[in-house]
Amino acid sequence: MPVYEYKALDIRGKNLKGIINAESISTARQRLRETSLFPFDLRETSAGEKDKTQAGRSAGAFLLKRVGLREVSIMTRQLATLLSAGLPLVSSLEALTSQTNNPRLKKTLAQIKEEINEGSDLARSISHYPKIFSQFYINMVRAGEASGALDIVLERLADFNESQQALRGRVKAALAYPLFMFLIGSGVLFFLTTFIVPKITGIFSEMHQTLPGITVFLISVSGFLKSFWIAILLIVIGTFATLNYLFTKTIRGQYIRDRIKLKIPLFGPLIHKMAVARFSRTLGTLLQSGVPMLTALSIVKNVVNNRLIADAIAEASRDVEEGQSLSATLLRSGFFPPIATQMISAGEHSGMLEKMLYKIADSLENEVESDITTLTSMLEPVMILVMGLLIGFIVISILLPIFEMNQLIR
């Protein structure tokens, strides 16, 4: 069924716009008039034939605004609320379509509703939009439909997305100030050494005075940066682009990158805890929603964002398939803290694995927040001290020749 975008006037003369599904443009116009809307612009936005749908999706999705995690979370919670109130799925999607502001998400919801009207289920329909709905999301919805508790599963999905978004926001907020200080400080130092220092030290060169060693060093650094700053910038950009390609596009580079990430002083343990917390919360959410263990593990390995830990999870999946316990194989990998594996073992024996996984995630996320607070409280004075020392070095290097000149005059 085609999807039409419309602009219309209501009975008060107010401009409205939205999208509507209809068999033809005349049917769409008639349905709008039945709702007291008078369209003055009505055009088709999706291919009318079934075999053109995929092309319309890919081309239209590229041009429309990106759908963020926050928008997906809001949509998921709204859909869960409508379903729990007893509204049918198609009617719920139609209501969401009219309320959604993001053009890409609005169009996607309309196409999903169209597919469901044609006999598809929700999980299969959203699987056509992998840029918006992850494999984790799709499998959760599939489990909810199979168990007949789609509204409950969607509530859990919304809770999960919101908790992940909140943690990510707190991490970014904590690191924003040190990063801002670093960028501003680096810019100030570059400006001083490249543009200010040469103008001041040029006076000393004209006087043919013997300069102190640190002043000569500062003049040399300043001259080098002034002469070759474009080449230095190009080298830095080229190096970054090369490393980015090696670390993101090659398998070996990805393993090296992820190993380095876990070994970085101060930040390595933080990244490690975040990966294990993400594993625990995601696995707990999947299991609680009725997704089988092996399927859940195959999904979780793709969300930890680390190939080394993902390989350990894949090995754990194979061991679990052979009848071994999850806790034992995770402990052997060396990537999961003993306390986490002990809690998983307790959950396996007590039948409360999902609750234990949630407790692990809560504990590790609290540790991450505490570690970030401590780290930023350490970074700020260290950065201020380093900046003070560098600027002090520049000031002393300039003032020393001036003091010597005063001595000679006396």
Image: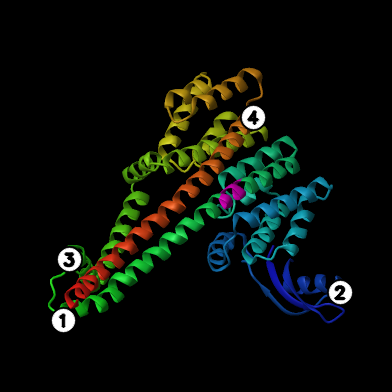
State the residue lying farthest toward the front: 410
Residue for badge 1: 206
Distance of label 3 from label 2 (alpha carbons): 86 Å
Distance of label 4 from label 1 (alpha carbons): 77 Å
Callout 1: helix, strand or loop? helix
Q: Which of the labelled discs sits on residue 354, or is there none?
A: 4
Mark 2 surroundings: few (<14), some (14-19) or many (≥20) residues within 10 A: some
Residue for badge 3: 212
Residue for badge 2: 36
Q: What's under tag 1, amino acid-wise?
A: Glu
Residue at image location 68% in from the left, 58% down from the top: 109
Up/down of 187 relative to 151, above or below: below
Residue at image location 60% in from the left, 20% down from the top: 346
Q: Which residues are magenta?
A: 164-170
Q: Name the mark nearer the viewer: 4 or 1.
A: 1
Quadrant in which the N terminus is drawn: bottom right
Tell me the quarter of the picture where residue 405 sits.
bottom left
Report if residue 321 is visible in the image. Answer: no
Distance of label 1 from label 2 (alpha carbons): 85 Å
